[in-house]
Image (cartoon, rainbow, N blue to C red):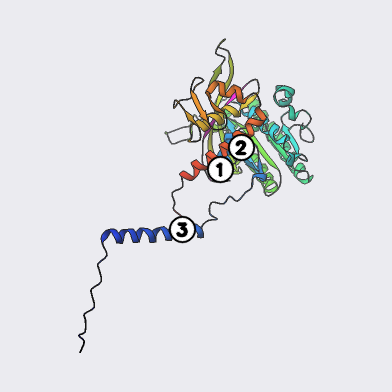
Amino acid sequence: MARNRKARPKTKQTAREKSAEDSKQLDLNLDDIKKEHADVDVQSYSEDELVPTGAVMLNLACSDFASGGYKLGSINTLPGESDAGKSVLCMTGLAKSAVLKRFDKYDIIMNNAEIKGSFNLKKMFPPLVDRIKLPEGGPSKTINQLGGSIIAQCRSGRPFIEIVDSLDTLKGDSDFEKSTKDALKVAKGDIAAIKELKKSYNAEKAKTIRKILGECNDLISGSDSMIVIVQQVTANMKMKNKYDDPYSSNGGTSPFFNSTHCYRLLQGGKIKDPIHGLEIGNTAHMKCRKNHLSGKKRDVSFNIFQQYGVDNIESVCLFLCSTPMWTASAKKVAAETTVRTNEFGEHKFGKLLNILWENPAKNMAILEKLAEEAWADRERSLDTGRRAFF
């Protein structure tokens, strides 16, 4: 009679084997989560819905695309310091829009009577010579006129890209403006009364701006048009602590509230000719205050030159040198820094820029693709890997 053999005890799983099995299961779970949420990172807008800002780096900061940053159907604000390059940036964006076929049927509007005479369009912005126009009825002088011209343009059925330069130059409604001036004459010499009148005037002007921009935003939203409103910033004299905004702008909170994008333009320093020491441009720093397109807040910098405007070639090259895509011999890139690239070979940075400027249109197209790829790689590296659990 055969003996009943006792079942052999199961071999205990070692801690290392258990850890490896748990790790494998965790990887499988993460793969399932990634597949389930694969659409989370898909953008809710396409490249064709974007309007060039004038600076490639700003385009990337706004939308993650190199070709455009502002979204059609939006109002955007550009507050900035005096002489920082706000108008040049806007004109560069309009010029870029003018050469894109998808904007062939658009009205390209500069709501500023002086702007066309301030620049040599043939030299700096040739695509705008026959395209740029003033709004119907001429440039807006009051806030109500601005609202009326935008509403009329929206109802015309013809899509448009408009720059309002600037909100600060617009006067308030003629009625309360006249009454304020009359009151100021009566209060002549009464400092307290004058301060109170000026305060009430600013409050009334902000109230009018809020009403007009709210109406315009309702019409623009969802349309194929886009507006950029330029603002002047000044030092905030009411700053109480380091957390307060060091700058203030005209028009109250309404311009910011109605904006899809709000980037503040600050001057980072003068650029001088190395031979004569004369000023030829300035560095511009764009500080993100609001981004309702991608939700990201990215600050970027670029140079603006008096001769030709925004230098997108140099700014993109400097960005690429800060990424693994290009290799620079020094962390702080200068003219004599050696830069190794797969696309253009190895050169001193200054020589590389000269080579790229020999055929700027062709080389800028290459740089835009490289910048977009490098930007996307950097953004992916910032992903925490976590997803919403509800």
Question: Which residues lie in the magenta part?
Answer: 290-306
Residue at 60% across, 21% down: 354
Choose mark 1 or mark 2, whichever is in front: 1
Report if residue 251 is visible in the image.
no
Kind of residue at badge 2: Thr
Picture layout, residue 86 above or below residue 292: above
Identify the residue under disc 3: 31
- Percent x, y of residue 147: 71, 40
**Marks 3 and 2 close (CB-CB < 8 Å):** no
Kindly identify which numbered label has been placed on residue 291: 1
Q: Secondary structure at mark 2?
A: strand
Q: Secondary structure at mark 1?
A: strand
Identify the residue under disc 2: 77
Q: Quadrant of residue 281?
A: top right
Q: First in sequence: mark 1 or mark 2?
A: 2
- Percent x, y of residue 14: 26, 62
Q: Quadrant of residue 212?
A: top right
